[in-house]
Image: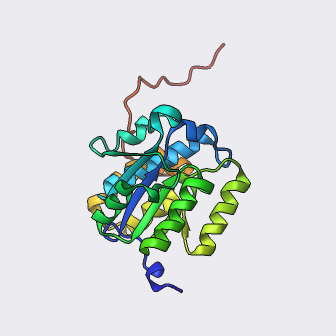
Amino acid sequence: MNKQKLEVLTPKNCQLIFIDQQPQMAFGVQSIDRQTLKNNVVGLAKAAKIFNIPTTITTVESQSFSGYTYPELLGVFPEAPILERSSMNSWDDQKVRDALASNGRKKVVVSGLWTEVCNCTFALSAMHDADYEIYMVADASGGTSVAAHDYAMERMVQAGVVPVTWQQVLLEWQRDWAHRDTYDAVMELVKEHSGAYGMGVDYAYTMVHKAPERVKHGETLDPKPAK
């Protein structure tokens, strides 16, 4: 067992790359509900923003085929350059290699489309050529079928890629609820993007701890039985 992979992810030891999170690529995804996919991608991006994780965004053939990166993702990193490519394998573009190297972190968290093509080839190449450790965010990535996604994940795991989920990464970065500098931002993220967990947080805040509701709304009218 590679001891480096036993080290948990922290805000200081990893970087993040988004590969081809573009509409035309998402149209082909059949392994996960596409709205769920986008939710998870944007949730992961917001988590990276909270913890100041160095983040790379790369795209393929934006104007001729794939379309522009989700605006919700770009809105999290409005100053980030978009590294455009012609290659399916991001590792084949020198800009991507340089961006990863400039961050100086060997643990690379990956979210991309499609799992069986762009994610898999990037992961294998980055591990083979430069000894990166790859952490593949399975639920912020998607393939053209469940089988395509699952077998690509299996192939990568056999090669040494570590499979993770976006919320797992978020909570691994937070690690301790006593880290108050990020606590409030993480809770806001959870409420917005973590489904039932977020609903539970809202419930606990308002019903148990008597916090005010987090949105303004109209007057609540008392019951009035019809006669």
Left or right: residue 121 compared with residue 188: right
Q: Quadrant of the C terminus?
A: top right
Q: Classify residue 124 by image quadrant.
A: bottom right
Residue at 49%, 44% (x, y): give it.
Answer: 21
Q: What sort of colour scheme is used for the picture?
A: rainbow
Q: Measured from the top left, where is residue 116 in percent x and y?
A: 63, 56
Choose between 117 and 113: the one closer to the eye.
117
Q: Measured from the top left, where is residue 179 in percent x and y?
A: 30, 66
Q: Measured from the top left, where is residue 84 in percent x and y?
A: 40, 44
Check the image and report above or below for 26 versus 134. Answer: above
Residue 184 in sight here: no
Residue sitting at the far right: 147
Residue 1 in sight here: yes
Q: Quadrant of the N terminus?
A: bottom right
Left or right: residue 73 compared with residue 21: left
Choose between 90 and 27: the one closer to the eye.
90
Residue at 54%, 57% (x, y): give it.
Answer: 119
Residue at 34%, 71% (x, y): give it.
Answer: 13
Check the image and report above or below for 60 versus 175. Answer: above
Choose between 77 and 167: the one closer to the eye.
77
Q: Measured from the top left, where is residue 28 in percent x and y?
A: 64, 40
Check the image and report above or below for 64 versus 109. Answer: above
